Amino acid sequence: MKTVLKNHIHILLAVIILGFGGVSSHAGTDTNKTPPRLRVVIVPSKNEVRVKEQFKVGLRVENPTATNQIVRVWGCSWDEEWKSSNTNISWVGWDCGKNNTYDLTIPPGGAYTNELEMLIPQPISDQSPTFQMGFTPIGSETTFWSDGVKLNILPPDTWVQRGKYYRDRNHDGKIDWEVSGMTFMGHAVFPFKSSTNSAGSLVVTEEFTGQGVDTFKVDTNYDGFYDLEYGAGGTSGQIQWTKSIHERVPMVGKDFVPIVKETWMDYWMPK
């Protein structure tokens, strides 16, 4: 009788142990199948960029679950909830006159979307950097990271050197355009005029007097020699004069500082 009772106890213990083991394994499987609460997706407007050149990056905080997800975010300074995994890749910030936080509800299958103007502000050794963007809701200790995105850094195509601007318009690594005496964009020489307004305050204005005709040189056939020189700008805002030249283009040196090509550099290009 004691032997039979002992066998029954052993069998019962075995069933209990196996039963608990089965429940534990099943719970682990369910946990692995549980979707994340939020999913971050980023989409750059382009993957080939130059240093200091801005590019747009779309940001999506998606809700892949079957229930509403509520996150607390900033109204104006919403970029404070974001971080880049690569400190060499940042974005252009902005000032906020008014700011507030609020609870945002992301429905199932929905997304919280924004867009940043990002850039690589300084030259870096890695010419194919990757980065992720992380979203941290206000009051949360969890950061939700996107997948990595790879960029290709293109060689510079615009430089400034001793007050002159240079360009590589066809991206063959050689200068083929320059402008000296730049006075139209950011380097105005127009005289300032002081006057008093109706309230008795002193007002300083910049007069447009016809100064500011800039000298351009262009290698039109990309053979290493400037063949066209012309003056453009001034009061009429047009090409003022042109002449044919034959002058070897300069080589990019150590004192040539890469900059971003600005919109005005496409003005007054001869047809």
Image (cartoon, rainbow, N blue to C red):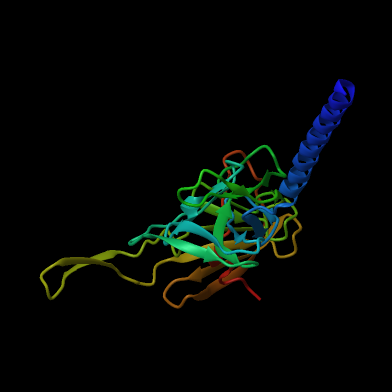
Q: Is residue 181 visible?
A: no
Q: Within the image, what quadrant is residue 196 found in?
A: bottom left
Could you tell me residue 201's position as x and y percent?
14, 67
Q: Residue at x 74, y 49 (%)?
A: 30
Q: Position of residue 184 (x, y in %)?
A: 45, 65
- The residue furthest left is 200
Rendered image quadrant of residue 7: top right
Answer with left or right where residue 193 lies relative to residue 24. Answer: left
> Residue sitting at 59 percent across and 42 percent down?
88
Please name whichever residue, 64 or 9, is drawn nearer the observer in this view of the structure: 9
Q: Is 271 on the left or on the right of 163, as rendered?
A: right
Q: Residue at the far front: name it.
A: 1
Q: Residue furthest bottom?
A: 236
Q: Position of residue 190 (x, y in %)?
A: 34, 65
Residue 24: percent from left, percent from top: 75, 39
Task: Decide if residue 53 is in sight here.
Answer: yes
Give whichever of 62, 196 is nearer the camera.
62
